[in-house]
Amino acid sequence: MIYTPEMYESLKRVEATRSARLSETFPRMSAQEKEDILRRFHPDFIPEAFATLRVGPNKGGKTPHELAVVLEGRPILSPDFDVGRADIETDVLVIGGGGAGSAAALMAQENGAKVVLVTKLRHGDANTMMAQGGIQAADKENDSPALHYLDVIGGGHYANDPDLVEAMVMDAPQVIRWLESLGCMFDKMSDGTMITIHGGGTCRKRMHAARDYSGAEIMRTLRDEVRNRSQDIFVLEFTAAVELVLDDRGQCVGAVLYNMETEQYLVARAKCTILATGGSGRLHYQGFATTNHYGATGDGLVLAYRAGAHLREIDTMQYHPTGAAFPEQILGFLVTEKVRGLGAQVLNVDGVQFVNPRETRDVESAAIIRECKERGKGVRTPSGFQGVWLDSPMIEIIHGPGTVKRELPAMVRQFIRFGVDITKEPMLVYPTLHYQNGGIKIDPNCATEIPNLYAAGEVSGGIHGRNRLMGNSLLDVCVFGRRAGIAAARRAREVRMGKPTLQHLVEWERQLREAGLEPKVRSPILLPNYVGKL
Amino acid sequence: MSEPEKLIPIYIMGRQYMVPPSLTIQRAMEYAGYRLLRGCGCRAGFCGACGTVYRIAGDYRLKIGLACATLVQPNMYLTQIPFFPAERKSYDLEKLAPTAETLFRIYPEVLRCLQCGTCTKSCPQEIDVRAYMAAAMRGDIAAVADKSFDCIMCGLCAARCPAEEVQYNIAILCRRLYGKYIAPPAKHLAERVREIEEGKYNQEIAQLKAMSEEELAEKYNRRDIEPD
């Protein structure tokens, strides 16, 4: 009972229309309508929000101001920092302890490598842990990897790298099988058949879930398995990477690490290095709240960019259509797409549908922004935000009482802590910053343009084009994390390292000078700063 | 915007800070000047980094919560328990049987559980930890897996347990045993993996990869969508 009287007035209209809406399907937009609504309302299409990069491999390209600031930042280390010593030596260095990093560590180990995994917070503090809805794989009889391919590339506006899409959709069933063999508890029927539902932009029901803790279930399982192999995989928590180390032949030979607690620097020497540092939602593009974990500050993009790797599609970010808009304590938190997958509709202040709930995320978000900003049909909150209703009580009517609690325990818990019972009352939602669509350019084995440097997971680009579909991120981190681990371990057998240097920082400083830049920000920033903020 | 909030006193590890009452513990600590490192992960109730123990002045009872999901209250004395040196056994899942014997061999202390229920009172997820520990003592791995499923492994149960159990590590062992051995395998999944390995979809994918954007768009926009 925490909604305001005005909100309750609106909720009465939601309840009044509910029974009629149960049989109502809001028409899907045509290709032309989608293009039009994206251009007019999606945050990617606000020109003032973007900067033109002035240094580095993507010079001349566009990216949000907030990312440009860190990409064009000043290194933390001076170029004469001594990288000749090695505090840690290993075959494969994995930077990042989320889903991709953990999958990479496991597969590198299975392929004979000694692995060191570093992560700047705890192992598992990652966006993977927070993913709720599920993981896609075309493993049902009426589905096929080709249909999955079509959904991915159409949803991504045909900007995807076809080789990467092929790798993802063809590996997908094998990845689910792998997770099943590691003991992940997927939702199944009594005969073992996977329970699968739709997500936005899917043509078949191929979303596999573990209640609404899908990412947490995958993350804690992978982490547990990494811990079981501690003889070959050495995990260093609270240890960030602040610069890559190259050798005199331009190969990556490790990284300079930073102990977040003791503030000491360490040099890690590795035959192959895997960047699995995740996304950048904590840069708060365009001032948006984010669903991302505390450490999502784009560190890997900065490191790879400064070392000379191209980034791609860094001019598009994903805004998840349903972030919590009320109460304020959970503003911007993720409300899983599984809520819509189970049948909940999206409604305006009059309790009326204005968009099909299964459009792709970019289109769904743009429609919600239009409803609030242009049509004035949003619901206002006491602190001046707006949102639209996500009618979760419908799920109980469609699938039977108890379904919400069974299928969405995390969501129920999230909201009841602040006084909203989503089994009986709809949630107020608004788009929230969710995902970095692009990233470091890779090939299907996760190799970057820098020899012996690999990238996997959200830090990489090209898989999802200009818009990722629900359930393809958990899939991506597993598919490409595994591929990176295998490729790096195999490559490590034949690597011959040269003399380690930070010469690329000298080149970077020269580029900054020539462009007339005097950056105040040192990057990577490692953590956001919320001190003193309300 | 409404009137600025009247500030309330909270005590972070004993020191008083004045903070707005609408904040969670996590945001109140930041408001007070802490730049968090330990005790802060996902900031949304999924990672278990921010387990917090608190007491309200005048009340002898200790309470628990996640700092990211608990509102501050006046005269709250709090500290975070971001790490607890709990026992964790390594094991090779491939070589285990999903039986009570396995569980008791790896974690013999399961049988020392007093069933006092302190763990249940200590769980910020409101899981009935005592009940799943009872199931563990019976060797009922499936029940442990089901009842513990929403665990975020914050470790508060272990931190408070008088019998020094490591409930959350026992629970994940049971979940993995269940997921691998007790839950029925997905036959359609194994079948699809086999088909892919045999190359059944190679040609179709190759055709899609060779298509122009116009051809792909035509195919995408006309694809049939499975009804609900």
Image (tube, rainbow, N blue to C red):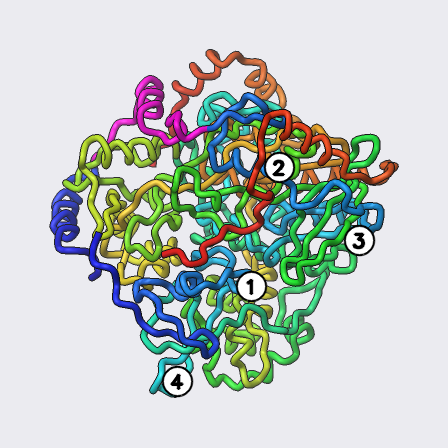
User: Going from the N terminus, do you reach mark 2 or mark 4 first?
Assistant: 4
Have a look at marks 3 and 2 and say if they share a chain.
Answer: no
Q: Which residue is mark 3?
A: A88
Q: Quadrant of residue B18?
A: bottom left
Residue displayed at 55% across by 69% down: B168
Residue displayed at 61% across by 38% down: A302
Magenta residues, dominant SS class: helix
Distance between mark 2 and mark 4 Cα atoms = 55 Å
Residue B142, image x, y percentages: 53, 65
Q: Which residue is mark 1?
A: B38
- In the image, B23 versus A90, the foreground residue is B23
Give SS at disc 4: loop
Q: Chain of mark 3?
A: A
Residue A420, image x, y percentages: 26, 59
Q: Chain of mark 2?
A: B
- In the image, A2 versus A83, the foreground residue is A83
